[in-house]
Image (cartoon, rainbow, N blue to C red):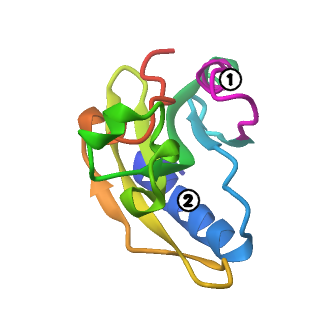
């Protein structure tokens, strides 16, 4: 069976939804890889913010990836001009930002081919639920949240 980017996307969405439901901890950035010989690899990426891109690149090269899904939990905002006043969206007032899961789909030699975002909702007991998935279609949509994705390896 050939693993498609659609398959990677479905795995990423199901895994993220399950993990959001099961734990109050932040999601570990996760790389789901389809290799040139049609194998599947799933890697938790643990490192500083500055190291993540290098770790992703290393895993892509090491696994001989042909495509991947990258799953990350992040802060987002709709106040794009206001964010310029802060170092990071995380530093903005709580009313001006929200948590979300972002999935980026990348194919070798094609770049970003899609993905999705879903807002994380918290209840008073800190239990998390995931809102509906919204598809993203290009790298401009992705840059709103994450610069960790690699398009050339």
Q: Is residue 55 magenta?
A: yes
Query: Which sits in the foreground, 43 or 2?
Result: 43
Per the image, the residue denoted by label 1 is: 55
Query: Which sits in the foreground, 51 or 31?
Result: 51
Question: What residue is rendered at 64% in x and 45% in y?
Answer: 30
The location of residue 50, given as percent across then percent down, is 63, 21
The location of residue 99, given as percent across then percent down, is 49, 59
Decide if residue 20 is on the left or right side of residue 153: right
Bounds of the magenta span? 44-59
Per the image, the residue denoted by label 2 is: 11
Where is 5 relative to 124, above or below? above
Question: What residue is rendered at 70% in x and 19% in y?
Answer: 62
Quarter of the figure with residue 16: bottom right
Question: What residue is rendered at 65% in x and 76% in y?
Answer: 21
Callouts 1 and 2 close, C-beta under 8 Å: no
Where is 78 relative to 53, above or below? below
Secondary element type, mark 1: helix
């Amino acid at each position: 069976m050939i693993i498609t980017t659609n398959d990677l996307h479905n795995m990423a969405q199901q895994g993220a939804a399950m993990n959001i439901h099961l734990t109050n901890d932040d999601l570990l950035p996760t790389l789901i890889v389809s290799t040139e010989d049609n194998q599947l690899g799933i890697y938790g990426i643990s490192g500083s913010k500055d190291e993540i891109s290098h770790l992703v690149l290393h895993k892509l090269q090491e696994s001989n990836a042909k495509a991947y899904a990258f799953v990350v939990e992040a802060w987002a905002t709709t106040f794009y001009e206001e964010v310029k006043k802060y170092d990071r969206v995380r530093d903005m007032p709580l009313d001006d930002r929200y948590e979300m899961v972002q999935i980026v789909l990348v194919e070798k030699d094609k770049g970003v081919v899609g993905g999705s975002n879903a807002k994380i909702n918290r209840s008073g007991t800190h239990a998390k639920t995931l809102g509906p998935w919204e598809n993203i279609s290009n790298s401009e949509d992705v840059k709103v949240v994450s610069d960790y994705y690699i398009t050339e390896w």
